[in-house]
Amino acid sequence: MRKISPTQAVQAGWIRYKNKAGMYTAYTVFSLVVSVVFATVAGGIGGLFSFNTFIQTTIIAIIAGIGSGLLNVGFAHFARKDEAGQEVEFGNFLDGFRINIKSVVVVMVATVVLSQLSSLLMPQELMTFQLTEEQSQDFELMMMAFEDLSEVLQANMGNFYLFIGLQILLSIVLMFAPYFASLNGKDGLESLAESIKLAFPNFFQIFFALLLITLIAIPVTVMTLGLGLLVIVPLVQLLAYDIFAQLTDEVLED
């Protein structure tokens, strides 16, 4: 397996996007709309479990996570066909909903559950913090709420840093599992194991690649009043796919 270069991964992602910018942007809009639908459904189902905050948030996260996983892997299906020189159409983005769905669902459920379990490190006040209508309309009450939240955070800084570290670790070492499941046809547990085996030795290179795209995304999003997300979202997905392709030797030699 080859080592990756963060800058080359970003450049490759940009080239892939630029070659089919219209289709990638259109699918991004489509994904955002469908994600809202999944989130709405997740919220409705999660409401049935309001008796327990952890169960409720986990159910919501699982449903939303499955939706995002199936949508996001569509970028990779399209990019793989495009790079192989095949004729591509919008429907290729939806291959994530047609190919090996069960394995992708297993991957997303496992990923969400692990992420949710790490949230148990944090006090309930932080995980469920939300301004009331009265607080949001009164600046003084709002500041008092944030001051109380800050005190809770300061008292739990150790757990907070551990929680953030675990979230970053999980997001990187499991990021390729949907690709192994949907693109390579592996079962759910095998996909998770293969992702860990592939990503862990390259953790810092992947982290720096994601950090680099984040540093690009923030000013672009701010300067375009959010419209830049229509470019940033597919670019992030293509960056992730390019790293996967490089590490599994899928990239075609020039």
Image (cartoon, grey):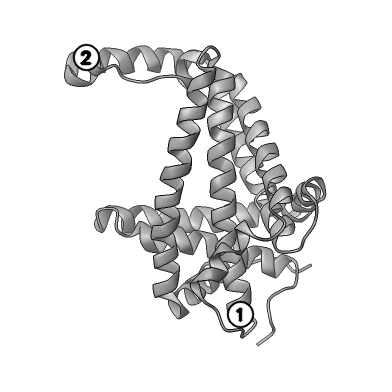
- Report the quarter where the C terminus lies: bottom right
User: Toward which corner of the image does residue 94 lie, by quadrant?
Assistant: bottom right
Q: Secondary structure at mark 2?
A: helix
User: In this figure, what is the number of numbered marks?
Assistant: 2
Q: Is residue 251 left or right of residue 233?
A: right
Residue nearer the viewer, 139 or 50 = 50
Q: Secondary structure at mark 1?
A: helix
- Earlier in the chain: of badge 1 and badge 2, it is 1
Mark 1 residue type:
Glu
Residue nearer the viewer, 76 or 38 = 38
Q: Residue at x 74, y 52 (%)?
A: 195
* Label 1 to label 2: alpha-carbon separation: 54 Å
Reading the image, the residue beneath label 1 is: 83
Q: Residue at x 68, y 51 (%)?
A: 203
Q: Residue at x 58, y 27 (%)?
A: 58
Asked if one can make out residue 169 in the rendered structure from this viewpoint, the answer is yes
Reading the image, the residue beneath label 2 is: 134
User: Toward which corner of the image does residue 139 lie, by quadrant?
Assistant: top left
Q: Residue at x 64, y 57 (%)?
A: 205
Badge 2 crowding class, 10 Å Cα cut-off, few under 14, some 14 to 19, many 20 or more, is: few
Residue 140: x and y, percent?
19, 14
Residue 220: x and y, percent?
32, 59
Asked if one can make out residue 158 in the rendered structure from this viewpoint, the answer is no
Badge 1 crowding class, 10 Å Cα cut-off, few under 14, some 14 to 19, many 20 or more, is: some
Mark 2 residue type:
Glu
Residue 121: x and y, percent?
61, 20
Q: Is residue 137 left or right of residue 214?
A: left
Residue nearer the viewer, 129 or 27 = 27
- Report the quarter where the N terminus lies: bottom right
Residue 44: x and y, percent?
46, 29
Q: Is residue 215 left or right of residue 189?
A: left
Q: Which mark is residue 128?
A: none
